[in-house]
Image (cartoon, rainbow, N blue to C red):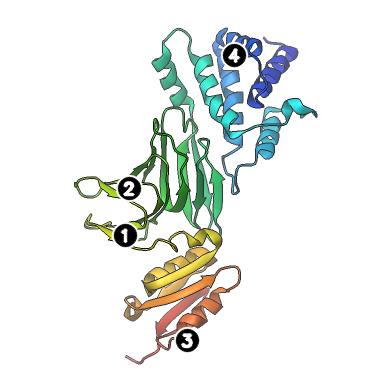
Amino acid sequence: METKERHTDIDDLIVSYLSGNLDEAGLTRLQRWALESEEHRAYVREQLEIGFSSGVAGSKEAFDADAAFASFLQRSGLRQETGHRHRILSRKILYRAAGVILLVLMTGIGYYQGKRTVKDHFADIVLEAPLGTQTKLSLPDGSVVWLNSGSKLTYSQGFGVDNRRLQLEGEGYFEVARNEEAPFEVQTRELHLQVLGTKFNLKNYADDKEVVVSLMEGRVALQNEVKAMPEVHLVPDEQVLLNKKTGEMRKLKTSVTHANCWKDNKLFFDEELLEDIAKKLMRSYAVQINVADSLRDRRFYGDFVIGKSSIREVLDAIAATGRVNYTYKEGKYILYSSFAS
């Protein structure tokens, strides 16, 4: 059985690596110790995976290096020391941590088999933006993602090791760090998106009738998962609408200025269906809204700031058009026609 001092010494090597200050001698010693037994490998792998994930999993803000390091120390049962040795835990170091996991797992079975072993031990990281909130996060590759309310992002803890794949449910705005050797891929049930480095907005909530992709910068390649057809490419100020039921894809040339305004707590309706507006309001304000069947095809224009406009003020503005009334009953807002049937 290893002594407490022995593990403490190894813990110090791991912390030095994660803080970017482990020299070649220390790295060699850590690798050799990990290769001595399966118990050692499991221990090092666990500590590195904690360090690798603590900076991104569940974060609702941009990546905070100091908070990530503090979380790593707390979860590892280590004591935080003062001084320059533990002052930095950068995204680059976290990104490299997966590479060290590869090294300590390879016990003569070959590089690619070792790589598969790593993937088997990686858990999925799931990040969610609850209703009424937006979440901003930094991925290990340097890309930045904003999640709109009611959205979920899932990716492997090994994201960036040999791919940059993730799954999205809901809406996200992506600013992707360029890497020509590892394309950035977003998978939804109806659409597969691939880019090298770009800025785009993707909306695909489960109750949406269409998937909407809006491109701000760069290029994207889109593969229809509903209906077999050639790959579609977008350039800036282009948008794709994918009908979930029929698989029809339409590419439009349009201004995408307001496509991601939600990340700044803004709502913009440009002649949108009242049914779709109600969905946005429910997600943004965490309320329930029922729309009368006679109003589902009505379209409205509006521009609101969520932090400055209450849900009642937004509904009042819609009602001011003279085409809609609303009431609040049994915990729900009910929208109905202003005209007698």
Point out residue 333 in the picture as x, y percentages from the top left corner.
49, 76
Between discs 4 and 2, the one toward the N terminus: 4
Between discs 1 and 4, the one toward the N terminus: 4
Residue picked out by circle 4: 40
Q: Is residue 170 above or below residue 140?
A: below
Residue picked out by circle 3: 320
Label 4, secondary structure: give it.
helix
Q: Nearer the viewer, mark 4 or mark 2?
A: 2
Residue picked out by circle 1: 210
Q: Amino acid at mark 2?
A: Arg
- In the image, what residue occupies the spot 39% across and 17% down? 112
Q: Nearer the viewer, mark 2 or mark 3?
A: 3
Point out residue 124 in the picture as x, y percentages from the top left corner.
48, 36
Between discs 1 and 3, the one toward the N terminus: 1
Circles 2 and 1 in contact, beta carbons < 8 Å: no
Circles 2 and 3 in contact, beta carbons < 8 Å: no
Q: Which mark is residue 189?
A: 2
